[in-house]
Amino acid sequence: MCVLTKYKNVIPDMKKTRRKSKEKYKTFNSSLRFEIGKYEAENSNKQAVDRDQVKESTVRSFKVKYLALQKSFAKSVLAQSSSSAENTSAVAVLSKYIPLKKRGRKSLLGEEMDDQLHQYVLQLRVWSLREWHYCKCIS
C-alpha cells in the first residue's frame, strides 16, 4: 500500500486551499477623518470604533492627527491674535480638515508639471476616443 493513499485525507488538496483575499482599504475624506478624530478625543477609543465601524488603529491615528492639528491651530491663532477676525475664521475653516497623506512615488517633474502632464494625457485620451468613434461611425 502506498503511503500517500493511506494518508490521503490528512494531506490537504492544494487546489482547495487558497489564501484569504486581502480586505480592501477604506478611504476617508479629510472632513470625516477630522470628525472621527474629534469624537475619539472626546470619547473612548471603543466608542469611536463601534460608532464608525473602523479599525482601532485607524481611529488612534486619526486622534493623533486631530490633536496635532489642534495644537498647530492654537499656535496659529495666538500668532494671529493681533490680526483681523477674517484671518482667524479662515484658519478655523482650514482646521476642520485632516490632510490626506500622499501615496506612491514622488513625481520626478514636480507637482505643477506633473499635474499639467496628467491633464494633457487625459485630453489626449478623450481626443483619441472621439477620433476612434468618428472613424467607426463613418465606416
Image (cartoon, rainbow, N blue to C red):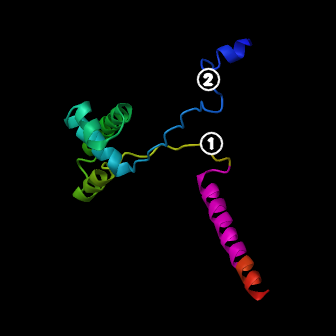
Comparing marks 1 and 2, which lies closer to the viewer?
2
- Which residue is at the far left? 43
Q: Which corner quadrant of the image does residue 72 belong to?
A: top left
Q: Please tell me which residue is depicted at 31% across the width and 35% down the height of the picture.
A: 63
Percent x, y for residue 30?
Answer: 38, 49
- Residue under label 2: 12
- Which residue lies most toward the bottom here? 138
* Total numbered labels: 2
Residue 117, label in figure: none
The residue that mark 1 highlights is 105
Which sits in the foreground, 13 or 134?
A: 13
Q: Residues within 10 Å of mark 2 (few under 14, many from 20)?
A: few
The mark that comes first in sequence, 1 or 2, is: 2
Amino acid carrying mark 2 in the image? Pro
* Residue 62 image position (x, y, % from top left): 35, 38
Task: Determine the image quadrant of residue 73.
Answer: top left
Residue at mark 1 to residue at mark 2: CA–CA distance: 41 Å
Three-letter code, disc 1 = Arg
Question: Residue 99 appears at what percent x and percent y?
Answer: 41, 46
Write the start and end of the magenta stretch as one range: 109-130
SS class, disc 2:
loop
Mark 1 touches mark 2? (CB < 8 Å): no
Determine whether 115 is above or below 3 in the image: below
